[in-house]
Amino acid sequence: MLKRRRFKQQTTLKERLAAWTKSLREQATKLPPGPDRDALIKTASQAETGSRLNSWLTSSGLQPPK
């Protein structure tokens, strides 16, 4: 049986998403207006949404359904 390789993340998901979003936005500012820039901005927005969802899911106020 193959053993699964494990990798322990050094930073939290929120930190990684924030860094990725920042780099995407920086790349987008260097490009002229067009479809490539729009795609980077859209991906950055999706990463921000993922970060918000992660914050919501890990919040202490989240209650299981009754």
Image (tube, rainbow, N blue to C red):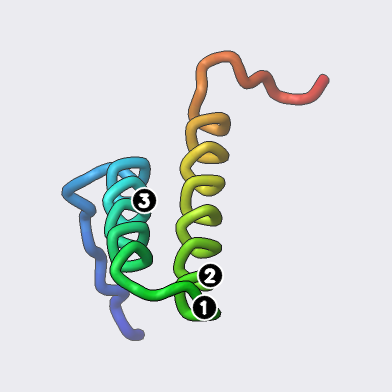
Examine the rendered structure and indicate whether residue 15 appears above or below residue 42.
above
Q: In this rendering, which labeled residue sits more in front, label 2 or label 1?
A: 1
Say whether residue 9 is left or right of residue 38.
left
Which badge, 3 or 1, comes first in the chain's sequence? 3
Closer to viewer: mark 3 or mark 1: 1
Q: Residue 38 carries which label?
A: 2
Q: Which residue lies furthest to the front in this view?
A: 32
Instruction: Say few, some or many: other residues with alpha carbon within 10 Å of mark 1 (under 14 / 14 to 19 / 20 or more).
Output: few
Q: Quadrant of the N terminus?
A: bottom left
- x 51%, y 16%: residue: 60
Query: Is there a contact, CB below 8 Å, between mark 2 and mark 1?
Result: yes
Q: Are marks 3 and 1 in contact (CB under 8 Å)?
A: no
Most extreme residue toward the right is 66
Residue 64 drawn above or below residue 47: above
* Image mark for residue 17: 3
Q: Which amino acid does label 3 sit on?
A: Leu
53 in relation to 22, above or below: above
Q: Residue at x 70, y 24 (%)?
A: 64
What is the x, y in percent for residue 18? 33, 46
Q: How crowded is mark 2: few (under 14 residues within 10 Å), some or many (20 or more)?
A: some
* Residue beneath disc 1: 34
Can you give x and y, in whole percent of width and height, for residue 3 in the image? 29, 77
Q: Quadrant of the rendered structure where residue 61 is?
A: top right
Which residue is outermost to the bottom?
1
Residue type (three-letter) at the residue carrying disc 1: Gly
